[in-house]
Image: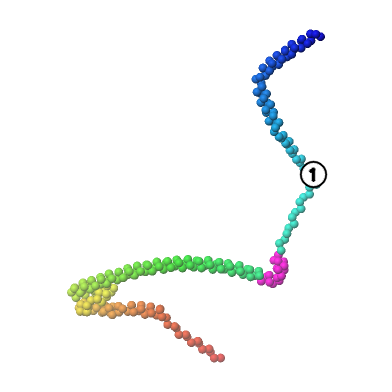
Amino acid sequence: MSRLPRILPLVGVAVGGVLAVKALEEVDAFPKAMATARAFAQDAARPAAKPAAKPAPKPAVAPQAAVKPAAAPTAVCAPSALELAKSAGLSPAELQVLQSLGDRRTQLDQREQDIDTQLKLLAAAEAKLDARLKSLDGLKGEIKALLGEAETKQAAEVDRLVTVYSKMKPRDAAAVIAQLDDKVRIPVAAKMKEAALAQVLAQMPPAEAKKLTESLARRYDAMRDLAAAAEAAANPQPTAAKPAPAKPKA
């Protein structure tokens, strides 16, 4: 037993050396141990996560035999016109009068629309007619100007022929005038001086001289007849009523 106290210090030194060697070997693992400890401390500081909620249990499905069919909605009938009239205190006769007035109002509205349409069509036709009348008035003015120009040229041509036949010898002028148409020789003869016309008529055959003289005398008859017809058309005379035939005596 006396050796035991001496051995204990040697065992302590040996254990201390072994621990020192292990400590030197674990120097490199110290930072890793510190990092692990730090992470463990952070995890411990965090609040514990709530447990996930369990899904709600599904409702039990009742057997098909227990499910009752939904009741069909009841049909609601709209009140008739007669029932509405009774509720308003109207008699059937008054209801019929109101219905007829409503129908009449509808007819009048439709007629008013038709009249408005006709008025618009008439206005369009009137505008077109006015434009047409203006165009015709312009055309009438152009025709009138052309007729005036033609009459002026014709009068100048007649004057020139009068001068020509007046300068000719009476026998030669008579021979030519006797063969002309009345539309040409009557205006020429009408503008010739009396002395020159007398010499020409004296040299013409008697039948042609007679015809030319009568034509000159009646050359305004057609114009007078036209004027009389226009005046009669403008002022129509009322026709006298014929007397009723006498009834035979019994």
> Where is residue 183 drawn, in percent x and y?
29, 73
Residue 179 shows up from this direction:
no
Residue 63 shows up from this direction:
yes
Q: In percent of the image, x 66 and y 71: which residue is there?
A: 97
Q: Which residue is mark 1?
A: 63
Quarter occupied by residue 24 = top right
Is 184 colored magenta in this rendering? no
Q: Quadrant of the N terminus?
A: top right
**Total numbered labels:** 1
Graded by Cα atoms within 10 Å as few (under 14), some (14 to 19) or many (20 or more), the crowding at tag 1 reads few
Q: Reply above or below: 38 against 102.
A: above
What span is in magenta?
Answer: 80-97
Dominant SS of magenta comes to: helix
> Where is residue 84 drawn, in percent x and y?
70, 66
Quarter occupied by residue 178 = bottom left
Q: In the image, 198: left or right of 28?
A: left
> Where is residue 104 drawn, in percent x and y?
62, 70
Q: Quadrant of the C terminus?
A: bottom right
Q: In percent of the image, x 61 and y 69: which residue is there?
A: 105
Report helix, strand or loop for mark 1: loop
Q: In percent of the image, x 71 and y 34: which residue is there?
A: 47
Q: In the image, 90: left or right of 154?
A: right
Q: Residue furthest bottom?
A: 249
Quarter occupied by residue 59 = top right
> Where is residue 209 drawn, in percent x and y?
24, 78
* Nearer to the camera, 163 or 54: 54
* Nearer to the camera, 191 or 198: 191
Q: In percent of the image, x 73 and y 59: which residue is there?
A: 76
